[in-house]
Image (cartoon, rainbow, N blue to C red):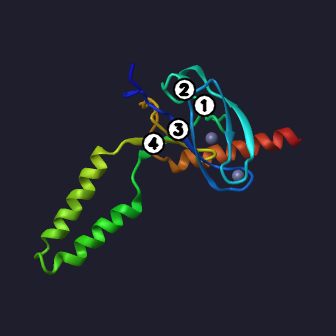
Amino acid sequence: MTQAGIKTMTVEFVCEQCEKDNLTNLLAETIVIKCSHCDHETKKTLTKSMQAGGKLDRCVLCDKIRFYVQKDFNPRLGIIIFAIGVLFSYHTYFVSLFVATLIDFILYQVLKTVTICYHCRAVYREFEEDPTHRGFDHNLALSLVEKEEKEKQVLTA
Ligand SMILES: [Zn+2]
Ligand SMILES: [Zn+2]
């Protein structure tokens, strides 16, 4: 038996206590999410679908169900590649500029998508892609915030 080919689902999140970035594997049914900076711990439960590496149906951190997808691309890397292209463009008669643009384009094509929670911005990797998840929708994000404000008002009323 080899471990190769087994996906490791991960979630990248910001600690609610110290507000630093963390990365945790998501494999078991119940996982203890522990901050690597301040040792703050929370116990969370994964849905059946998520345990199997299937579709994301509930954010493990905030229990919300709205997600958006984007390419797992470090924008800084894209800028560096492009800057190098510009730097050499004079000597290479702008061929380097074209190459840099091409590299950026290819990178974008081969990169995987990540799924991000609208509410807490947790970043999920290696889960099955859900075709109903779209790119970031500003209006949806706004309406979700408004909905939440209303719910809060109802609770406190
Ligand atoms: Zn922390
Ligand atoms: Zn969330």
Q: Name the residue under label 1.
A: 58
Query: Hey, which residue is sitting farthest front in the picture?
Result: 1
Q: Does residue 89 appear in the picture of this structure? A: yes
Residue at image point 60% right, 33% down: 65
Q: What residue type is labelled 1?
A: Arg
Residue 50: image tag: 2
- Badge 3 or badge 2: first in the primary sequence: 3
Q: Which amino acid does label 3 sit on?
A: Thr
Q: Does residue 62 appear in the picture of this structure? A: no
Camera-near label (2 vs 1) is: 2
Tell me if the residue at label 1 has its CB under 8 Å from ligand 2: no
- Badge 1 or badge 3: first in the primary sequence: 3
Q: Name the residue under label 4.
A: 114
In this rendering, the answer to whether 97 lies above or below 1 is: below
User: Label 2 neighbourhood size at 10 Å, few (<14), some (14-19), many (20+)?
Assistant: many
In this rendering, the answer to whether 26 lies above or below 12 is: above
